[in-house]
Every structure is written in structure tokens, then in C-alpha cells.
Image (cartoon, rainbow, N blue to C red):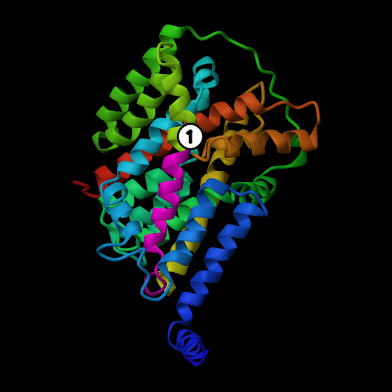
């Protein structure tokens, strides 16, 4: 008992930061279980944060299992890219193909990334500032790839911020959208005319997007390419079982490994710092301005359009698929139960998925990724 007591006293006295990280891990686990906020991400991240912050933890270090996973799956960007195959297999680009102008909203909703880049560059070196800015895309895999290739020293904080804000989309977005719109604007109805999209178009779309994106931003080829490859598996019609595996088994398995491996970057000494708090703040700043940018772009278009757009759909242009699209639809129905915005908002949401990975490729191209 005396030895145990001495160990507890030493822990509280010398390693209080580890206790703080246990609390942070506990909060992430609570949000995953009690609030059901992205449990496949936050639960392994929270538990992993506890694992790596136990004194002399065998989970990290040269022979640690989590360190081995990190080197095998994140240091070489393998996990995020494989996850993109699963995400691509989940996405139906039909709403975008039937209404291509929705792509504009996906592009507009990346405004916060470049705005935050300017702000972050006042406090951090350019490679770190660029990595922090991409948090605004609300796309964890893209954030990991960008921060890894730009060799950011704040990879852990960036990963945690990106995934946390993805999970907190239902909490963060609604007040921003309400602040940027009036009740009358939120009640605008947008009739949806179902248009058939040929199988040939669906098959050609991921191939063409990969080529075009590669020509515009060559550094985005791996990001866009893996996403579009997943979508091609879905749409080709001859790999149904593989598509189902990619959507469910593969995506879930990689997400679990990715979540718990991210925690290797959450060691107390690295994570608890002023810079980490600044990164979390700048990430939120980027997220807010991405949401607002999409909304105000729609409001701008309404100045010239006879048939008005519900500006809320612009907020779905971030990459958090399909949460952002569902939130916009729900907010529309809260104002008017007969207002169905789901197809429009999901169309914008999937276009935001493409735009975010292209934005990540542009960031890599601008800041010298090898």
C-alpha cells in the first residue's frame, strides 16, 4: 500500500499533465458514448489518449504496438488513403451530376481554409500554418496527409482538432448558419426535380475528376485518386461485394485503427501547450469561416437569381459527409416541416468532399510538398 501511495503521489506531483490527458481521453469517450458523436473516431481516440499517457506505457516507444501502427499506417499516409476508398464507395454523386452547379458551393465552402492560412502564418511557420488551415475542410484524412507531407511539428494537435470538429459538426454549424441567415431565408423551398443519370456518366465521372484534379493540382492525385477509385468500385456494377466491403468492413476497420493510432501524438508533454490551444482555436476559426463562406456565397447568388436558393445549403459544402447535409435538411424542416432540402444539401456535401481534397492538393503544391 505504501508503494502504491508513493506512486500516486509521484504521479500527481510530477506527471499531472498525464492526468489531464486522462481527463481529455475520458471526455472524448463520453462524447462518443453518451452523445453519440462519431463514436468510431472519438472512442478509440479517447482510449488511445489514456493508453499513451500511462507512465512508462508499453503501448508506445520502439516496441510499442501503437507506435508500430503509426509507422505502418500514418507516417506513410496509408491509413488515410485507404479510408478514402471506403468514403468514395459510400458517396453517390448522382445529385451533383444531375445539378452540376452545386459544385460551386463545395468550392465556396473552402474559403475558410485560405483565410485561416493567412491568420495562422502570423503565429506559425508556413508549413505548420498551411497544415493548420486544412482543419477547416472538416476532413480528417486530408488533414493527416497534408500535415504529414508538410512535416508539421504539430501533427497530433492538427489530427485531434480535425477529427474533433468533424464530430462536433451538429453542435458548431447550426448557430453559425442561424447567425448568417434570416428566418425567411431558412424557409426558402427548393423543389427537387429527379433527373436520371446514365451509368456511363457515373462511371466516367470519377475518372474525369481524377484527371482534371491531377492536372490542376498534381499533389492532389493520391487524395482525389483514392476517393474516386472507391466511387468507381461503387458505380462500375461488377464489384458489388467489394463495394459493400469497402463501405462497411474496410472503412470501419481503418477508422478504428486510425483513431487509436492518432493518440500516439497525444502525449502530454507534446499536447498540453499554448500552441496546441492556438491550433484548436485556429481550426475552429477555419471551420466557422468555411461554413459562413458557403452560406454567403448562396446569398450572393440570390441577388441575381429569379428562383432563390436556400442559403443554408451552402454550409453543407464542408467535407463532413453526410452530417453537414443532414443538418441543413433538419434545420430546413425545423423552420418548415414541408421543406425538403436533403437532396440539394447532400449534393453540395459530396461536392465539398471533392473540393476539400483538391484544396489539400493545392496547399501541398503551394508549400513544397515532396
Magenta residues, as a range? 252-270
Which residue is more in the foreground, 67 or 198? Answer: 67
Residue on which disc 1 sits: 352
Residue at disc 1, secondary structure: helix
Does residue 208 sit above or below 352 in this rendering? above
Q: Quadrant of residue 31?
A: bottom right
Q: In the image, residue 141 lies at what x, y percent?
A: 40, 44
Q: Report the front residue among 369 and 106.
A: 369
For mark 1, does the 10 Å Cα neighbourhood hold few (<14), some (14 to 19), or many (20 or more) residues?
many
Answer above or below: position of 153 versus 349.
below
Can you see residue 189? yes
In the rendered image, the vertical position of residue 9 relative to residue 203, given as above or below: below
Magenta region includes residue 273? no
The residue most toward the left is: 370
Q: Nearer the viewer, residue 309 or 161?
A: 161
Residue 12: x %, y % from top left:
50, 85
Q: Is residue 255 magenta?
A: yes
In the image, what residue occupies the spot 38% across and 48% down?
143
Residue 196 position within the rendered picture, expressed as x and y whole percent measured from the top left: 55, 8
Which residue sits at x=52%, y=70%? 22
Q: Residue 201 appears in which quarter of the rendering?
A: top left
Q: Residue at x 38, y 44 (%)?
A: 142
Magenta region's main secondary structure? helix
Q: What is the x, y in percent for residue 13?
A: 47, 89
Task: Check the image and name the residue furthest to the front.
Answer: 1
In the rendered image, is residue 116 in sight? Answer: no
Q: How many marks?
A: 1
Q: Determine whether, in the image, residue 26 is placed left or right of residue 114.
A: right
Amino acid at each position: 500500500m505504501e508503494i502504491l501511495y508513493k506512486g500516486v503521489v509521484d504521479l500527481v506531483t510530477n506527471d499531472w499533465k498525464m492526468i489531464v490527458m486522462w481527463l481529455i481521453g475520458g471526455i472524448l469517450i463520453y462524447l462518443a458514448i453518451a452523445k453519440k458523436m462519431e463514436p468510431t473516431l472519438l472512442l478509440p481516440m479517447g482510449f488511445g489518449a489514456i493508453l499513451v499517457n500511462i507512465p512508462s506505457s508499453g503501448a508506445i516507444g520502439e516496441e510499442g504496438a501503437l507506435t508500430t501502427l503509426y509507422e505502418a499506417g500514418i507516417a506513410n499516409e496509408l491509413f488515410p488513403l485507404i479510408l478514402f476508398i471506403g468514403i468514395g464507395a459510400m458517396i453517390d454523386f448522382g445529385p451533383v451530376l444531375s445539378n452540376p452547379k452545386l459544385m460551386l458551393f463545395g468550392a465556396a465552402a473552402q474559403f475558410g481554409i485560405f483565410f485561416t492560412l493567412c491568420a495562422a502564418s502570423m503565429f506559425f511557420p508556413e508549413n505548420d500554418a498551411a497544415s493548420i488551415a486544412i482543419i477547416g475542410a472538416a476532413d480528417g484524412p486530408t488533414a493527416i496527409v497534408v500535415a504529414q507531407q508538410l512535416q508539421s511539428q504539430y501533427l497530433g494537435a492538427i489530427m485531434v482538432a480535425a477529427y474533433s470538429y468533424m464530430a462536433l459538426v451538429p453542435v458548431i454549424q447550426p448557430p453559425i448558419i442561424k447567425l448568417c441567415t434570416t428566418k425567411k431565408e431558412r424557409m426558402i423551398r427548393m423543389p427537387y426535380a429527379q433527373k436520371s443519370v446514365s451509368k456511363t456518366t457515373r462511371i466516367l465521372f470519377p475518372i474525369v475528376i481524377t484527371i482534371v484534379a491531377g492536372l490542376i493540382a498534381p499533389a492532389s492525385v493520391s487524395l482525389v485518386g483514392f476517393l474516386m477509385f472507391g466511387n468507381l468500385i461503387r458505380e462500375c456494377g461488377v464489384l458489388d461485394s467489394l463495394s459493400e466491403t469497402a463501405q462497411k468492413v474496410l472503412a470501419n476497420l481503418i477508422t478504428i485503427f486510425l483513431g487509436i493510432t492518432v493518440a500516439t501524438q497525444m502525449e502530454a508533454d507534446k499536447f498540453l501547450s499554448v500552441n496546441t490551444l492556438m491550433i484548436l482555436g485556429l481550426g475552429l476559426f477555419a471551420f466557422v469561416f468555411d461554413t459562413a463562406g458557403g452560406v454567403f456565397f448562396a446569398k450572393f447568388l440570390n441577388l441575381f437569381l429569379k428562383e432563390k436558393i436556400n442559403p443554408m445549403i451552402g454550409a453543407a459544402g464542408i467535407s463532413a459527409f453526410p452530417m453537414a447535409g443532414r443538418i441543413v435538411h433538419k434545420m430546413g424542416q425545423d423552420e418548415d416541416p414541408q421543406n425538403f432540402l436533403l437532396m440539394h444539401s447532400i449534393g453540395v456535401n459530396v461536392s465539398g468532399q471533392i473540393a476539400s481534397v483538391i484544396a489539400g492538393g493545392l496547399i501541398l503544391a503551394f508549400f513544397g510538398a515532396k
